[in-house]
Amino acid sequence: MRETTGRPSAYFERVADDRLVPTVHAGGAWSDDEQHFSPVGGLLVHEIDRHRAREGRPALPMGRVSFDILGRIGFEEFEVEVETVRPGRTIELVQATMLIGGRSVVTARAWFLATLDTEAVAVVDAGQLPGPESAEPWPLSSVWSGGYIASLDTRRVGQARPGRGTVWASSRVDLVAGERAGATASFVALVDTANGIAVRQDPAEWMFPNLDLTIHLFRQPEGEWTGLDTTVTFGGSGQGLTSTVLHDVRGPVGSAQQILTVRPQPATVPAR
């Protein structure tokens, strides 16, 4: 456990094999009575890992995971169901579903691919970020509120501008109390933070929550830091896109995309 303050030391606590409850650290940024999606994403990868280990599936690296956020993620007890959709020795697809009160609120589908030696043809065009040790501490709580945001150590690389920002993120909080999460699950648990590091408009005036998150990995992440090199685009008809090159301390590992629903906060809509 990483905390010794008497507060919960994890984002979630397990109350049964397939049931968990959020702790104060999982609190949402848009609303106090919701869970932040970022640790939920990491948890679903952790549950997929547990499922595959329990079934004795081949030890394949994850190449892609896509999340669909089907509804409000209330701050309450929930259930996770996991199934192997497409078993295989070299390619496998696994799905996890988060349910609250019997209603599906998030689905995750993860592809696992065989490991092969391709070092002779390996090429990565994206450059490496300056390390977190040289980055400027930047509390994300200066922009957002909520338990999840408060749990983060965020450090900004270079100067940010509306719609463009680069940040290293790490957390002192474990994913599930008493359980050791894998490096990929812990990395994924920080990726959804990307939508909040390069805001185009003041979130007190505009809402831009994401409806999904898709992560592609060409290398498995290592270490305790997630690097987010992020660009946010707003279209003219209510849609937006957050695009991120993902890094660990060794360099780029993949990319993430989030589709946004862009709308004014209700209080800012002019009265008719």
Image (spheres, rainbow, N blue to C red):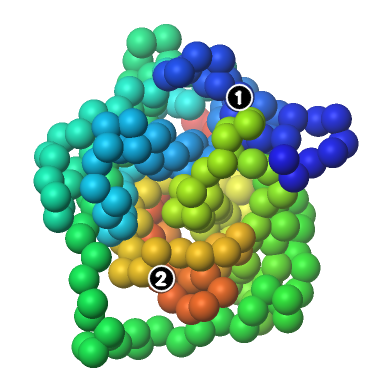
Q: Give the residue number, with chain letter if any, for mark 2.
A: 253
Q: Position of residue 45 (x, y in %)?
A: 40, 42
Q: Is residue 267 left or right of residue 61?
A: right
Residue 196, compared with residue 43, is above or below; it is: below
**Three-letter residue code for mark 1:** Glu
* Residue 13 numbered mark, or none: 1
Which of the two residues, 140 or 249, is positioned nearer the viewer here?
Answer: 249
Name the element at disc 2: strand
Q: Is residue 13 above or below residue 205?
A: above
Q: Earlier in the sequence, mark 2 or mark 1?
A: 1
Is any atom of residue 12 visible in this view?
Answer: yes
Would residue 165 be seen by someone viewing this image from the given angle? no
Q: Residue at x 41, y 70 (%)?
A: 253
Q: Residue 124: give its label.
A: none
The secondary structure type at the circle numbered 1 is: strand
In-image side of 240 versus 134 (left or right):
left
Residue 209, image x, y percentages: 47, 44
Residue occupying image coordinates x 39% and y 64%: 220
Quick one: label 2, few (<14), some, or many (20+) residues within 10 Å?
many
Whole-percent x and y of residue 161?
A: 61, 73
**Type of residue at label 2?**
Val
As drawn, the residue found furthest toward the right would be 5
Residue at 48% over, 43% down = 42
The residue lying toward the viewer, choosing from 142 and 129, is 129
Q: Which residue extends farthest front?
A: 56
Provide residue 184's location: percent of width, then percent of height: 45, 54
**Crowding near the residue tagged with mark 1, few <14, some 14–19, many ≥20 C-alpha atoms within 10 Å:** some
Give the distance between the C-alpha atoms of the residues marked 2 and 1, in whole angstroms.
29 Å
- Dividing the image into 4 quarters, which one contains the N terminus? top right
Q: Dividing the picture into quarters, in which one does residue 9 lie?
A: top right
